[in-house]
Amino acid sequence: MRWMGPTAGRNERMSRRDLLRTTGSALLVTASLSGCDLLATDPKGSAGDSRGSARTKDKEAPDLAAQVKAGKLPSLAERLPVLPGGRRISFDVEVASPALVPYWTDAMQLVRTYWAKVGVEMRVKAEDRALFYERKEANKPHATVWTGAGGREFDVMLDPRWFFPFSVESNFAIPWATWFTSNGESGLRPPATTRRQMELYRELRQTPDEGGRAELMRQILTMAREEFYVIGTILEEEGYGIMSDRMHNVPKSMPESHLYNTPGPTNPEQYYIEG
């Protein structure tokens, strides 16, 4: 955040990785689907592990596009999985309204048209924030929209919500997050990779060495890249505040984050007005 004075210019049993392998595109549907009920489960109620890689090297993308154009490779729409009854993938994306960021709903309408071009039907569902939270905590949404790390979050070690099911604020895999926060007493036991992330984070919390914590967090982030839980879309623009020319001892810029508790750490009690 910069300060400016007045004169300053559901229920189809298909895993995320199955979708990735079938579509060949990590940017469609896949891991932003929130409900664990969309993931295959074993008879004991634990989420089944599935294999495959979500990684596609950037340099391969032009070759794939050329193959599709030349007719050597089916288009993405043709490669999308068909659900029972011949139905194509269809799901809702829920957005809290009024949105935390004003353009969320409009932006998702653009995303809806992009996905429609490759055969994916997505519906934008704007709803009151209280209802949004009620449905999220009940694990009902297919997918949701919120701010993410790199936009607002200040420290991934303090709040790694987007890199594994850390809490209900992760917005995805709520039963897995409940399993983590309850130490396995309730919720749904996640697959091995996600459990490993949780183990590493517990170890991170008990590691006094800064370098050791950083290394553990790097391991968690590497796994998150492979699991592809969320899809980043738009980096929020830099914010600003309005400040009187009479106000002094105020930093020219500061982080904007609920974790930083803006502007608390800048010591507002030491700001002063002159004249």
Image: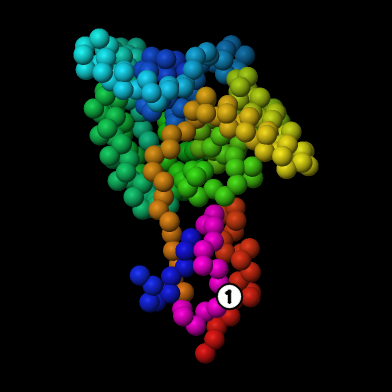
Q: Give the image location of residue 243, x and y in percent.
A: 46, 74
Q: In the figure, residue 71 lies in which quadrant?
A: top left
Closest to the observer: 223 or 253? 253
Which residue appears at 26% of the width and 18% of the height? Answer: 66
Give the prevailing secondary structure in the magenta stretch: loop
Is 75 located above or below residue 139 in the figure?
above
Which residue appears at 47% of the width and 68% of the height? Answer: 3
* Highlighted magenta segment, given as a residue range: 244-257
Left-right relation of 86 to 3: left
Q: Is residue 153 visible?
A: yes
**Disc 1 designates what residue?**
249
Determine the secondary structure under disc 1: loop
Whether residue 253 is in magenta: the answer is yes
Whether residue 200 is in magenta: the answer is no
The crowding category of the residue bearing disc 1, from other C-alpha atoms within 10 Å (few below 14, some 14 to 19, many at least 20), is: few
Q: In the figure, residue 27 lies in which quadrant?
A: top left
Closest to the observer: 140 or 23? 23
Q: Give the image location of residue 172, x and y in percent.
A: 51, 33
For this orientation, the residue located farthest to the bottom is 275
Left-right relation of 45 to 32: right
Which residue appears at 60% of the width and 52% of the height? Answer: 259
Q: Is residue 128 visible?
A: no
Q: In the figure, residue 72 lies in which quadrant?
A: top left
Is 168 located above or below residue 192 in the figure?
below
Which residue appears at 50% of the width and 45% of the height? Answer: 150
Q: Give the image location of residue 9, x and y in percent.
A: 35, 70
